[in-house]
Image: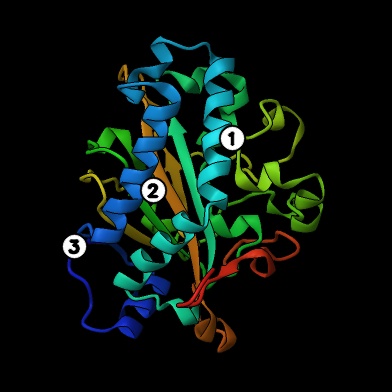
Amino acid sequence: MISRRRPPDDETLRRALYDGEVFLLPSTDASLALVGMANDSLRRELGDDPRHAHERFTDEELFGHIGKLRREIYTQPHAHALLAEMAANVGFSVRDTAFDPARLRVIAHRAFENPRAAPVYYPHRDTWYAHPTSVVTIWTALDDLEEDETFVFFPERFSRPVDNDSEVFDYDEWVSRGWSLKIGWQDRDASLKARYPSVLGESDYGPAEGFSCARGEILLFSGAHFHKTLPQALGRTRFSLDARLVHLRDHARGLGAPNVDGRSRGSALPDYVQLHDEAP
């Protein structure tokens, strides 16, 4: 399912993504620049060797530092511009694409034991969070990662429903509480108070497919894919960046992945960012 060979043209690539193919593509100057910017920010905030910062900070201290960096990366125009260039390199032209900006993701050593982090590990589709079926996730790691440090897809469930409660998610209500929830994990107790879409009852999703990757490589997949972050107790923290892309002409034509079980309400698309050559 995960291919390292890109189709010959952009439209074929997007249609393959909507059909469930996943692509792990080589790093580009833009992806390495974005990764470098994020790593510089991590070292500035956490000191040398951010992957072992959990050994130097309490959970509460680390959460405060990471929240500051998430906000910075999500809102910074330079990060937007690098994301747009990175997306254009792999088939999503700037003028045709709307972006939900890059989020810093942090999977800390033994974080799965913390009840506050539980939603991080829920198997889900991105479309359960009111993203359109045309959404494509673009993901890159800040370090070389082994297969047990990333996440897995459940290919058999791309076009088969999973029993879930995605109807609990109302986008307009979500952002009405403030943008901290939209940026992600800014409120330390959010997972104890907010409702996140989750699976109901099922536990057998079929075979899982994972991947390893090098720093700055670009993973592209449909937001309709059913996938799950892996818990880890490897003594180091995983840092990555992901964003969401919608090709606006495809969206206007009704192109996208099948919606087999999503019932979330509202739409995140009006809050996406559209960039132009001259300025954000």
Q: Is residue 55 left or right of residue 249?
A: left
Identify which residue is drawn at 69% across, 69% down.
270
Marks 3 and 1, how far apart in space? Answer: 30 Å
Q: Please, what secondary structure does the residue beneath circle 1 have?
A: helix
Q: Where is 257 relative to 130, above or below?
A: below
Which dot marks residue 4? 3
Identify which residue is drawn at 70% across, 59% down.
264
Counting residues from the start of the chain, the first of labels 1 and 2 encountered is: 1
Which dot marks residue 206? 2
Identify which residue is drawn at 35% across, 36% down.
40
Looking at this view, name the residue that lies furthest to the bottom. 253
226 vs 63, nearest the viewer: 63
Q: Residues within 10 Å of mark 3 (few under 14, many from 20)?
A: few
Marks 2 and 3, how far apart in space? Answer: 23 Å
Looking at this view, name the residue that lies furthest to the front. 278
Circles 1 and 2 in contact, beta carbons < 8 Å: no
129 vs 88, nearest the viewer: 88
- Residue, disc 1: 119
Q: Is residue 202 visible?
A: no
Q: Please, what secondary structure does the residue beneath circle 2 have?
A: loop
Q: Quadrant of the N terminus?
A: bottom left
Q: Where is 14 relative to 123, above or below?
A: below
Q: Is residue 173 visible?
A: yes
Q: Is residue 182 left or right of residue 136?
A: right
